[in-house]
Image: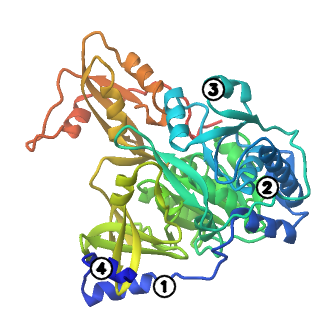
Amino acid sequence: MSALERLNGTRLTGTEEAFALHRRINRTATDYPRDSSVPALFAASAARHPDALAVVQDGRAYTYARLDRLSNGLARRMLAQGFTPGSTAGVCLTRSPELIVALLAVLKCGGVYVPFDAGWPDERLRGLLARADCRWVLTDRPEQLARRLGACRVLPVDEGVEECETAPGVEVGGDALAYVNFTSGSTGSPKGVAIRHRSIARLVLGARFARLEADSRLLQLAPVTFDAATFEIWGALLNGGTCVLYPEGLVRLSRLGRVIDDHRVTVVFLTTALFNAVIDEAPGALDGTETVLMGGELHSIPHVAAALRRYGPGRLVHVYGPTEATTFATYHRIDRLIPDSGLLPIGTPIQNTRLYVTDGTTLCEPGRTGEICLAGDGLSPGYLGMPELTAERFVDREIDGVGERLYRTGDHGTLLPDGSLVFQGREDDQVKINGFRIELGEVAHHLDRHPAVRRSHVTVSTERGERSLVAFVVADPSVTSASLRHHLRTLLPAYLVPARIHLCEALPLTATGKVDGRALLAAHDTHTPPPAAPAAQPVATRD
């Protein structure tokens, strides 16, 4: 039976106008080494540019040759101690050259890296490492993690890694898994998104959205647990460029400008919130860059307009993409704004990526809103240990006589007549804050686990352009907001803990019987500054 025969009954129909527009925007195929692994592609970069700077952070720098030798040494050490190809390894290091050594070493062993944050609660850490069948952890804080993760073999990684000229003789293909990113899940359990070597290569080789070449210098700013780090690290190292590691966990705007200037950074990715803060407080920080990529949340037209006036056309690029499609799926170069429209397209597909806007079984014509579905070499094989959710979100369809595997993003969008895609929001309770994907249901799930909580509602508050999580809780009189925040901190990463928790006698309902989130926000004073929370991602601050 042919692939198309197996897809009988799952054909997408549509008008000729809809098919013609989708054909035009999906002409994205380009040649690239799709069967090569990340270590093989890195080895090619190291052979071409052995003395070029691969990684730099403040006064420390590794050439390609030295980074190659260090990662060879760590990989051989892992294999000698019993690590087997195909296994997973947790990676928990501060942003440093050793972090890059560790990532490369895991891949050179034929392994799969699982980045995590030491600040995550023990229960969450143990759960996600068990989901990934992760029995090894590479870290720069071995004693702390050995106490917390007794079931894992903890391997310290520091500046004393032994160098080795020859790489392990482990064959890895483009179809093998490279890493797993865990994202928020609506059922209370984080979702492990598996990503292949091929998907990383598709993201960073022959890029349409930014110039990535041997003289490119990419700023590595995102936490390694955030999929933007995939672009920042491998976008440099697989093209022979330089990965410039920001020297601190917390982003200080004046320091950001100095790092960019001192290291002649050419490409920067900023979440929308951080981009807005830079434009407000320190726009000069980006003056020396060649390309500024921004995205991850709903845009602010005034901030984009101010940036366009300062930097001019050709330097700002709006990007969009879920973790399941490997960081970026679409891009839009911002050369001008559509007057009085409030629209900022998320653009057209990047290389070797296809997108479809569908309404059930129908392709949407220009101007008609539907669900954004993605296809191509960036797609994840699915969620670890969640076959039902994988089958729900990753589907096979026949489109224009061709079989496609689609990822149903849950995002909605509209194609303009020129083929640009405009984001139109979501129907479910998933939001993005500071670039992190958050399922409001996951936060509510853990609130409701508290024995004194009878009902809760979690939503998003927007004040002065800043978005934050807010929770409303009906609970026993003995409960305080502080005790609920402590409860959540023992279960969730800091970015999932609401900035405010309001205790209520009841939750008002709309005429349709749903919790009236707008009424709750209007009834409570949201101008009181929220209590401080531990930083879970780079946060802009003044010096």
Farthest residue in the left direction? 511
Numbered disc in front, either 2 or 3: 3
Instruction: Determine whether label 2 and label 4 are within 8 Å by CB.
Output: no
Residue 161 in the image: state x and y as whole percent: 86, 42
Task: Give the mark nearer the N terminus: 1 vs 2.
Answer: 1
Q: Is residue 23 visible?
A: yes
Residue where numbered disc 4 is placed: 366
| Residue type beneath disc 3 | Gly
Instruction: Determine whether label 1 and label 4 are within 8 Å by CB.
Output: no
* In the depicted structure, whether residue 80 falls above or below residue 345: above
Residue where numbered disc 3 is placed: 150
Q: Is residue 425 left or right of residue 249?
A: left
> SS for tag 3?
loop
| Residue type beneath disc 1 | Arg
Residue where numbered disc 2 is placed: 263
Numbered disc in front, either 1 or 2: 1
| Disc 1 from disc 3: Cα separation | 50 Å
| Residue type beneath disc 2 | His
Numbered disc in front, either 4 or 3: 3
- Mark 2, Cα crowd under 10 Å, few <14 / some 14-19 / many 20+, is some
